[in-house]
Amino acid sequence: MNRRGFLQWGCAHCALLYAAAGRAQAGADAGSQWSIPPRFAAPDAASDEGGLWATMAREEQRVRRSPFLIRDVKLHDYLQAILCRLAGSHCPDVRVYPVRSPHFNANMAPNGMMQVWSGLLLRMDNEAQLAAVIGHEVGHFLQRHALERLRDAKSKSAAGVVLAPFGLVGLVGQLALIASVYSYSRDQEREADTISVRLMSAAGYDSSQASVVWGNLLAEVMAGPNADASKSSVLFATHPASEERRDVLRSLGKAEGEKAEQAYRERMADWQLPFLEDELKRGQYAETIELLGRKLAAEPARGDFLYARAEARRLRGQEKDLEQAHADLAAAAALANAPAQTHRSLGLILRSRADKAGAAASFRRYLEAAPDAPDAGMIRTYISELET
Amino acid sequence: MTMGRNREVPSQAAGRAIRVAAALAFVLAAAGAGAEEPRNLAPGFTALPQNAKILVAPIDVELYSISAGGVPEPRADWTSTALGNMKKELGRLRERYKGETVDLDERAADDFGELLALHSAVARSISLHHAVGGMWALPTKNGKLDWSLGDALKPLQDKTGARYALFIWVRDSYASGERVAAMVLMAALGVGLGGGVQQGYASLVDLETGRVLWFNRLARASGDLREPAKAAETVDALLLGFPGAK
Amino acid sequence: MKRLPWLFAVLLVAGCATPTVSKVEQGDQLVAERLAIKLDGPWNRFDGLGAFPVPTWTVEGVTVDRLQFFVGIKDGKTLVPQSDAAREKRPLTFRASMQPHEIVALFQTMLTADGSTFDLVKLDPVTFLGGPGLRFEYSLVRRVDEVRLSGFGYARVNNGELHAILYQAPRLGFYPRYQPQVDRMAQTASLRS
């Protein structure tokens, strides 16, 4: 599959949509006259919109009950505050649910329920980028795109696919299935992008960050070994990145306003390591290494990023991987903010090189930093083996 | 050759045949009830005490559409309709029950997700290994309804004051237009394609001991849950033989 | 999300695969002709290549608890049969040079192939099959139906071969009920060459 084909992966009719040469730049309805619509009244239960709300209410119940919901009040409140800032007068009608899943995903259902997945939270560099994605979904919500799609005669038979992303999509196979037909039309995506820029500006965010999000996504997926057969990369199943989107957003965005980088780092601090561990568990090391390379370029002195990149290499274990992993771990170990696991990984590498003294020392540092680690028992055995 | 059933474009004759088959199934089930050791009841259990308080757990139903390729896709909109229909019939049956029934408040249910998921996993094993049984029967169970969740569900009793709980679960799938077309074509070529399957269970559990007291599996050849009358029939079939006090 | 397994069960019942279930009696038993174990009570054993590629036992049923035996997995072989595509993406290949952490990572990869989430609870050295081995405990949230499971495994590499016993059951009610007896069984297991 050639590169352009790759970018439109998973969307059967997108090839047609993007192929036309002289396509209009600003085809969106959200022209300069657009302003935030008034709050929606609860629809009549017998109407199609009412049926849609009832359906979504049930999906929301499942999300609330799911073990994959992140039940951290502080994180929830932080995300809810951003959502409210962007949704303006609609704030009372929208609710955010952070979900533990290492894929890049966020969506808002027609009844105001929003999901934000942890894979997305990991990939944001600052609050403005997160606001770009949230703002985009709010755009779909404000313009009632899902209802529009449902009413569209052509998509009646695909109603299941229109609605599916708003549920708790877990199985990898499901993600791929949903990606095979977009929920929103190209015009709707464009409209949501335009609105997101407006909402960001109105809320005081640097709207040029929206374009950066897609650029980063593209780079990450391209780094994967399956860049050609990207149907298998479900990382971005629900939000396929495209050069076109990145470029359009670049032209729309304005580099004024807050990025809120520091605020984002602080609020995400407790979740960095768990989300990094989730990312490592995906086992897609090339993508992980690309992601962390970008993160480290912005913040070179992050022990957790160095540890995670090293771990991706150590686990992949190809030629030169162990050498590079060792370098990253040594750099991390010198930093005060290195997670305890840094020393364990270093110990494992040194042990595999028969550097007994070095390995034992690293393992000891690990146990000092994490005396109640799950594998403390095994590590103690390594130490005694190494020191006999 | 098996003609799969389809509910999107039923022919008159097919519809009639299905209704006859369903009626027959009811008759056979009723006839078989007293003939041998009651498979639906736990050993030593025959009926609930008078006016026992029962927690009615949220109905767990999911409807799917099957595309031409045979892949089932969940249809939240169909499910929503089916749920409404089933709740209505269940409500009617609850009114006729002499004891007290309580619901699990929707907000409260958020805290009991793990318990509900656990029961469902156990019930699906009972469905396969006991209700279906046959080559799937677990020899150590000796053909008996012998499952217990131990003290795992006690929090539900503590929350609601109910000693017993009733769980209902249904999965159903309907052929999409494309699938029906594919079926018609395949039939013409002499190949059978299944249209869809309706499966479900009703389970009565003693929340204090965790014992599954009564279990009824349903496997019907017809019954569009999106239609109120059919959904009511399904609920009635699920609760056929419910061991209320005599 | 109880999406696929019910359909899977229906397909199996319809005869797309023909597994059998047989009883394993209490007392001395031999698994895969090499692993000698002592059972406190009877178990149910599944046979049927497609659905159960390794010896798989249960007390309460396929959706509840599961005991698996990995016997004599050789260097370069996968834990369970994998398609070429699956093996390219996330290989389950055992290497005789693997260290304890890598063996645990191997089982973790197997257990998370369907999107389930895995957390290591404990990893300790133990004597298993008469030699140095490992014991690990884990918690798993099964993706397909969101059930929380607890599990443990014993493993040992002997003469370049991997032998392991893996057990998991729902965290509530079932794991506490059966873990002690399965642990005892694993501790007293021995290997015939």
Image (spheres, coloured by chain):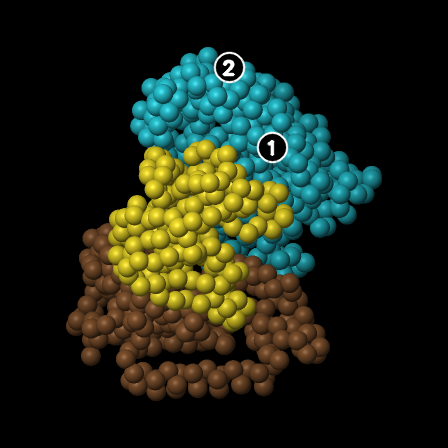
Chain colours: A cyan, B brown, C yellow
The quadrant of the image that shows the N terminus of chain C is bottom left
Residue A240 position within the rendered picture, expressed as x and y whole percent measured from the top left? 64, 40
Chain bearing tag 1 is A
Residue C157 lies, with reference to residue B199, above or below; the image says above
Identify the residue at the far left of this view.
B50
What mark, if any, has residue C190 been given in the picture?
A: none
Residue C13 lies, with reference to residue A102, above or below; the image says below
What mark, if any, has residue A331 been given in the picture?
A: 2
Identify the residue at the far right of this view.
A21
The amino acid beneath tag 1 is Glu
Look at the image and tell me whether residue C10 can be seen: no
Give whichever of B194, A371 is nearer the camera: A371
What mark, if any, has residue A287 been given in the picture?
A: 1
Residue beneath the point at 59% across and 68% down: B175
Residue A95 position within the rendered picture, expressed as x and y whole percent measured from the top left? 44, 41
> What is the quadrant of residue B52 in the picture?
bottom left
Chain bearing tag 2 is A
Residue A188 position within the rendered picture, expressed as x and y whole percent measured from the top left? 65, 44
Residue B72 lies, with reference to residue C138, above or below; the image says below
Residue beneath the point at 51% across and 71% down: C14
The amino acid beneath tag 2 is Ala
Q: Residues within 10 Å of mark 1 (few under 14, many from 20)?
A: many
Residue beneath the point at 67% across and 70% down: B182
What secondary structure is marked by label 2? helix
